[in-house]
Amino acid sequence: MPKVHVVTDTGSDLPAEIRSKYNIHLVPLSIQFGEEIYLDTLELGAEQFYQRLAESSVLPSTCQPSPADFVKCYEQISEPGDEIISVHLSSRLSGTYQSAVLASTLVEKRSIHIIDTKSASIGIGLVAVAIAEAVQNGASAAEALAVGERVIEDLQVYFVVDTLEYLRRNGRIGAASAMVGSLLNIKPVLTLANGIVTPFDKVRGKARAIKRIYDLFADYVRTHPGRKIRVGLVHSNCLDETLELADKLKAEFPIEDLMIGLIGPTIGVHVGPGTIALLWYPI
Amino acid sequence: MRNAGEQEDTKVDVINGVEFKRIITAAAQVLAESKDQINALNVFPVPDGDTGTNMALTLQAALRELDNLETDSISKVAQAIARGSLMGARGNSGVILSQYFRGFSDGLGKLKSANGRQLAKAFDQASKRTYKAVMKPVEGTMLTVGRAIAEACTAACEAEELSVADIWKIAVEAGSKALDNTPNILPILKQAGVVDAGGKGLLVALEGAYKALVGEIEIADKPLVMQEQTQEAITRIEGVLVNKYCTEFLIKGEQLDVDQIRSDLAPKGESLLVVGDQKVVKIHIHTDHPGQVLEYCTGIGNLTDIKIDNMQYQNERITEPGTPGKNGLEAPSNPIVSRNSSKEKKPIGVVAVVPGDGLAEIFTSLGVDIALYGGQTMNPSTEELVRAVEEVNADSVIILPNNKNVIFSAEQVKELVEKRVEVIATATVPQGIAAMIGFGDHLDLEANLQSMQEQLAHVRSGEITFAVRSTKAGELSIEEQDYIGLADGKIVAAGQSLTDVGVSLLDNLVDDSSSLISIYFGGDLEPETAELFKQEVANRYGHCEVELYYGGQPLYFYIISVE
């Protein structure tokens, strides 16, 4: 059977050890602070990024990998005859998917499948892990792709940001632009629908916003009895609240696996510090 | 027994429009003079006993409709009074009074003058109208007094022909008896030791009319005119006032088409109000070209009562004290209206009634289009609400009354404007804020109404003010000037320490599932005092977040929400 390789981008927020474990390859987006450009993960880590963000007067932006970057990666990681499954950021949030698709037409002698997860952050990570895990367990590319498709369909996502400013200024705010800021410390609870940021609810106070997300998870578990859940929980500078939420979830619900991670620079540019995101799907 | 055709003797007299106007003017005067007394009848010893003020202002507004009405027809005068009180209605009692007048006017049909029997019919229709107007009629209120009057007059007429004076006397006597009986019908009246305020207001008005009818009182040359807090919404673009001429006038003509006039004038300015009928239409508009507006209207009819004010200078003009306040305290003298100016039309807009400037800012930041002042000391009139709704550039408008005494007035607006208007029956400011949290620009009207309504169940409201008289509330003994705490409208704490009453109130509102306490402090408090109270609360309820905001409301030291 031909070898199957799994690739993703730095929007996936997968902890390094998970990538190692499942042998998932990474193609980085670039983070631009004014004139300075860094490759996410390879040249700029998450902690450094938030430090830089706090100190910088300039708002950073992200830049998708070029098709050439993908071509290089695909050719480097594989042999002719191999298959590649490339798992990426929602095509409506980033041009990364398009770049990968273009690259796949330029690479010879490999069968390349590009997946639009319609998601972001650890959502991409969960899809990539499910696919890589299937491959490690002997699945063919077609079988692994089917696994991936199912995860994408069932994936749930809710996140709370401290401020909508990062989303707004980077142009990814979508319909959430109508969620006005206010004097009352209101936190927006957001989701992704059809691959774009979508308003879900407004809650007063961060703690209560997190509780709202917890409640949504609880409702889901209740309405899907007998299922085990795989969870990805990521944050930017909210370690305490994140750990507290993780403990609660693990204690109270049938969680098969809970991945905790830091929101990396690629996503961090768009949501800013103070974000917590909970993503999950039923096994 | 009289044969048909026999000369009617002088016992059966009639009352015409001129006479009716005279006695209703007297009624308004007496009602204005008695407003404090009526305000004091509020079951709750809280400093917003509005009933007297509201009814007096409603009747005063009604009379303004008569200013230039030249007629001796009683039915025309009655119609004008009904029309004027409809728009000028403030508070629940004002709205019911306006319905009473409407029924009265319906009962008079097209009569030029009315005899005793015809008057009895008018009293009867007046009473029936009030029952129709109220969703859940409560006995022991103005409704009961009105009904007793109707029944007594109707019964009396069956027995014999009575004069106008006789019928009116019967009305006043029956009303008085029914009023005195209201504590026997409504237990809360008995406990508070008062008769129903709305019923009292109606009786006082009818009594005043009677005394004028029989010559017992004189109408003062300069009748007492109450200060009203006028709402003039103003738009500034980059600091410059636009549509700065507040232009008001009457058009008198034949077959005037109110809707046509409204749509023709709409592009000429903002805050447009067109009200009236085929013969008389009242226009109010803010425009930069008053000449054009007037010119257009001269083609429709004759203009009278033309008033043009330059609003640039008007704010400085309103330096007189605002509403008559309780215990020497007065509402802020500048009407507070804040708005989100948006020149683009949107599907749904929101108008919120707010009692303070800080709260106006908060509601505006939550996305409300117009924050209209009107709370504890002065409820907005139906007309003011109509103006605000007309002004919002949206297809549908949601109103948040934020005060239980404004809900009824807000409901009236639906019939008076073309736009789709819905009211979320918020009885307190915290409920209004919760409703706005539930509001989403991305939702359609039905989804919004549902979402906003749902939020109300999750918030508890607290208020702290002071007692205007000594009384008992359940087990609590309250002394005048005591601080009192109300939980969702019910008095649960009283005492001489503001902090203690506050804590006692919160003990009533906070439970294990609470997570957020928001405190909005009033304009009568120093920020430092409020800050100390917040600390006290945060210490006491460790499991809750506590947030403090400036509300600016008069008379209510703290408005508190617990979620």
Image (cartoon, rainbow, N blue to C red):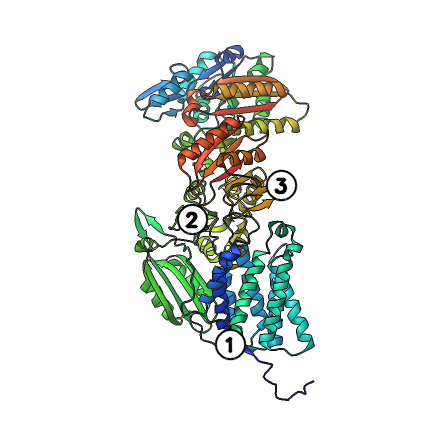
Q: Which residue is drawn at 59% across and 45% down?
A: B472
Residue B369 is situated, as x and y percent measured from the top left of the image, at 44, 47
Q: Residue at x 59, y 27 (%)?
A: A217
Q: Are callouts 3 and 2 both on one chain?
A: yes
Q: Which chain carries label 2?
A: B
Circle 3 residue: B475
Q: In which quarter of the image is the N terminus of chain A?
A: top right
Circle 2 residue: B329
Residue B179 is situated, as x and y percent measured from the top left of the image, at 61, 60
In this rendering, the answer to whether B282 lies above or below B140 is below
Front tag of 1 and 2: 2
Which residue is most to the bottom? B6
Q: Are callouts 1 and 2 both on one chain?
A: yes
Residue B258 is situated, as x and y percent measured from the top left of the image, at 46, 65
Q: Element type at marker 3?
A: loop
Residue B383 is situated, as x and y percent measured from the top left of the image, at 47, 58
Circle 1 residue: B73
Specify the amino acid type for callout 2. Leu
Q: Are callouts 1 and 3 both on one chain?
A: yes
Specify the amino acid type for callout 1. Ser
Q: Nearer the viewer, residue B509 or B345?
A: B509
Marker disc for residue A125: none
Quarter of image, res B6 = bottom right
Is residue A191 in sight in this rendering?
A: yes
Q: How far apart are marks 1 and 2 (CA)?
A: 43 Å
Q: Sequence order check: which comes first, mark 3 or mark 2?
A: 2
Is residue A118 in sight in this rendering?
A: no
